[in-house]
Image (spheres, helix red, strand yellow):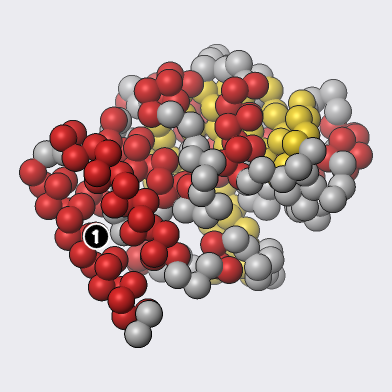
Amino acid sequence: MDDVSVIIPVYNRDYSLRDAVESVLIQTYKPSEIIIIDDGSFFQAKDILKNYKNHIKIIRHEKNKGVSASRNTGILESSSKYIAFLDSDDIFLPEKLELQINFMKENNYQISHTNEFWYKKDRFINQNKKSKRYGGKILDKILDKCRVSPSSLIVERKVFEKCGLFDETLDVCEDYEISLRFALHYEIGYLDKNLIIKRAIEENSLSAAINHIEYIRYNILKNFYEKYEDRFNREEKEALLCELQRKNSIIKENFR
């Protein structure tokens, strides 16, 4: 079995962290390491997770640096071929790692993501059609919004050497930005099985608190286009320009 590291960033989510860790510990495909990045929380993760101390590694940022910096710390501290991510309010289902890594090996994917259940406050909710996910060469299909949940991602280490790490200048939409870079360089495998539970326990999640998130996506996409313009084929370039125009129209409408 190839080794896999699971990286769990956490900031002030003492109420859900244990659930996340336990969902990794019961995996049918045992990870070689579970790395918790305590991003300057008001609590000490080592105290919350003292019963699991023999099964996890905890790294603490003394000051809050953001989720991108936390994931990057985990990537740099990890040692496995595969790297999986889990947000501290989400949960892996028991066969998540086994099914997804086997899927990647069988199809020669270096990056993959899965489908998910959505849980909001106190109940499961249906996903809307606008959140459809894709596999293969998907760049032109993920320009509008992030369609790759970080908690569903498994990435081979060598991918980060080519694509770079998470953008630490972004407080939100960092998953959207890195998905664009992944899709530019690689085909992305999509396993259409619900293998995580994506939970929205709080009302005040970061992305929900941003009134003009389309403005952030617009700037990310604009910078992406300008940086990699010579890498796009004609269809991708047309799709990018069309989406930039659409986002610009939404922004202008919001600021009227």
**Taking 99 as reference, is 244 left or right?**
left
What residue is shown at x 48% (from left), y 31% (from top)?
Answer: 165
Q: Which quadrant is home to the N terminus?
A: top right
Q: Which quadrant is home to the C terminus?
A: bottom left
Looking at the picture, how far across and down is residue 47, in whole percent? 91, 39
In the displayed orientation, state which residue is furthest to the bottom: 256
Count of numbered marks: 1
Camera sees residue 146? yes
What residue is shown at x 23% (from left), y 67% (from top)?
Answer: 246
Q: Amino acid at mark 1?
A: Leu
Secondary structure of the residue carrying tag 1 is helix
Q: Which residue is mark 1?
A: 244
* Placement of 39 over or under 7, stated as above or below: below
Of residue 105 and residue 13, the one placed in the foreground of this image is 13
What residue is shown at x 19% (from left), y 40% (from top)?
Answer: 229
Q: Answer with the quarter of the image where residue 187 lies.
A: top left
* Placement of 177 over or under 187, stated as above or below: below
Of residue 38 and residue 101, the one placed in the foreground of this image is 38
* Placement of 158 over or under 104, stated as above or below: above
Looking at the picture, how far across and down is residue 85, in whole percent? 57, 37
Looking at the picture, how far across and down is residue 136, in whole percent? 26, 38
Looking at the picture, how far across and down is residue 126, in whole percent? 48, 68
**Taking 181 as reference, is 116 left or right?**
right
What residue is shown at x 30% (from left), y 30% (from top)?
Answer: 186
**Taking 226 as reference, is 157 left or right?**
right
**Taking 61 as reference, is 241 left or right?**
left
Mark 1 burial class by Cα count in 10 Å: few <14, some 14-19, many 20+ = many
Camera sees residue 19? no
